[in-house]
Amino acid sequence: MTLRAVADCLTVQHNSMRWHLGNKQGLLARLAEPINGSGAGHAPADRAL
């Protein structure tokens, strides 16, 4: 494996991780909105965490 291939692999993994974290934050924010609006939707967010 060349150094270039290793670097590309790490870059892909890093970008994938960043996307995953960003996506998870967006999902939590969407789950939190109804909870903040009304106390009704609390259980789904607890399960998601």
Image (cartoon, helix red, strand yellow):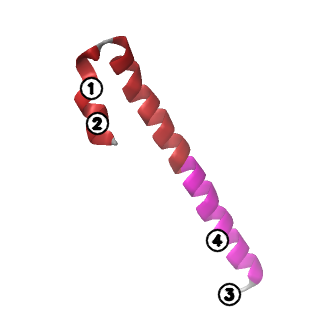
Measure how far apart labels 1 and 2 are at the Cα level: 7 Å
Residue 25 coordinates in the image, percent (x, y): 49, 38
Q: Amino acid at mark 3?
A: Met
- Seen at 49% across and 34% down, the residue is 26
Say whether residue 16 is left or right of residue 38: right
Q: Residues within 10 Å of mark 2 (few under 14, many from 20)?
A: few
Q: Quadrant of the C terminus?
A: top left
Q: Amino acid at mark 2?
A: Asp
Residue 4 coordinates in the image, percent (x, y): 76, 77
Q: Which residue is mark 4?
A: 9
Query: Of callouts 4 and 1, which one flags the residue occurring earlier in the amino acid sequence?
Result: 4
Where are the magenta residues, as a range? 3-19
Say whether residue 11 is left or right of residue 22: right
Q: Amino acid at mark 4?
A: Cys
Q: Which residue is mark 1?
A: 42
Residue depth check, mark 4 versus mark 2: number of the one nearer the observer? 2
Q: Secondary structure at mark 2?
A: helix
The circle drawn on residue 1 is 3
